[in-house]
Image (cartoon, rainbow, N blue to C red):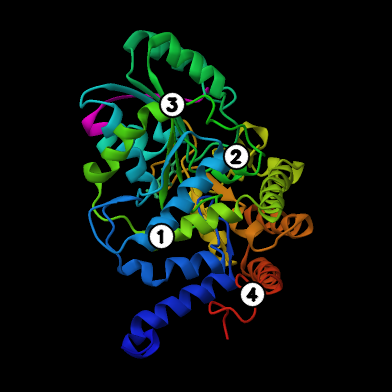
Amino acid sequence: HGPLSEVDPEVADAVEAELRRQQDTLEMIASENTAPVAVLQAQGSVLTNKYAEGYPGRRYYGGCEHVDRTEQLAVDRALDLFGAEHANVQPHSGAQANAAVLAALLSPGDVILGLDLAHGGHLTHGMRLNFSGKLYHALPYHVRAADHLVDMAEVARLAREHRPAMIIAGWSAYPRHLDFPAFRRIADEVGALLMVDMAHFAGLVAAGLHPSPVPHADVVTTTTHKTLGGPRGGIILSRQALAKKIDSAVFPGQQGGPLQHVIAAKAVALKLAASAEFRRRQQCTVDGARILARRLLQPDAVRSGIRVLTGGTDVHLVLVDLRESALDGRQAEDRLHSIGITLNRNAVPFDPRPPMVTSGLRIGTPALATRGFTEPDFTEVADIIAAALAPGYDAVVAERLGRRVAALAAAHPVYPAGSQWQLA
Ligand code: PLP
């Protein structure tokens, strides 16, 4: 039972290589972040050994007194941070949080409305091959072709016509705020429940930089690892009246033993998310995305066919539309990858290219902001990205841009000196 490097050098080597990749490149996948050392320590702790089916004070196993404390801390901090009436912190992931809510509040065959996956929605909002599209009668709403904003007139029309049991608001790729009061009005008019999936923007909500869905929705789900910056996992917030149904849909409905090491790490992340430092980083996240959007709206980028969907951003990501560019999404992703910037190609609404190619890029700033990037750094990143997507890109340009990326990466260690996760 020695250290990882002795017990399993192959796994140790891959972990070390992944840490080096994170250190040497710029992570701009919008759903990713850099978990703080304290979160990693909680998640890598002995709490992983503990079975604790049930909830704090009501467990089906002995010896739960300490994990009761950490789970209760996570619950209390989630309630405080988001001003909710009830929190379940046990879902293993965002997808499981959504599955539990739908199982708790709907019957198979019920109608649900969700944003089309191809227009920025998530798999669990009714995609055909997902449980949400198979178990329920899922109808997609869309963004408008003219401005790429959610078509609330279509939401209202579909709601009146099909009388959904639940309307789902939330997204994986959308650069603007949603109109939660408008969703609430439509849900009330047709007697539907409103669920908001704030997985992407929960950190911004926690920092007060994005309208909160909590006062408007019956249920709010989130992941804890995106803008929120914690361990991988999910949380469900709800009104007290739905608490019992939701808790029993998570356990015993969907899950067995909760991941107490992850729940402790959620507690840590939620504590950090209430700090002034976290708020500052979230502001840098949004500022960074705005700088990126502004740079890609400059005339040189526009001339080469680059468009910014909705003309900018209010959140932590920018959606680049390459439908009029010589580059497709895959080529653009590959170019940026080759100079050390990691992001993902992404279908744009009404995309003429297949999903494996796409005509878009989704570029996110949370991981860089957590890493300490501020305005000058984001200005440099934006310039590098614009240059990489410009005509005239070749091996010489790539070499030069790669050096600029390396300099930025070296100036901002992902983990602080002296921590277990710092590279030698
Ligand atoms: N909900 C939204 C809006 C998401 O973007 C995601 C992840 O991308 C999820 C849920 C699912 O989270 P997880 O990957 O933890 O299952």
Which numbered dot is residue 205?
A: 2
**Secondary structure found at label 1:** helix
Are the two marked residues, 1 and 2, in contact with CB atoms closer than 8 angstroms? no
Instruction: Kindly report the distance in space between the C-alpha atoms of the residues bearing marks 4 and 2.
Output: 27 Å
> Is residue 137 part of the magenta span, yes or no?
yes
Circle nearer the N terminus (3, 1): 3
Q: Which residues are magenta?
A: 133-144
Q: Nearer the viewer, residue 337 or 150?
A: 150
- Mark 1 is surrounded, within 10 Å at the Cα level, by few (under 14), some (14 to 19) or many (20 or more) other residues, namely many
The amino acid sitting under disc 4 is Pro
Circle 3 sits on which residue? 218
Rendering quadrant holding ligand 1: top left
Q: Nearer the viewer, mark 1 or mark 2?
A: 1
Circle 1 sits on which residue? 262
Residue 336 image offset from top left, x and y in percent = 57, 60
**Secondary structure found at label 2:** helix
Circle 4 sits on which residue? 416
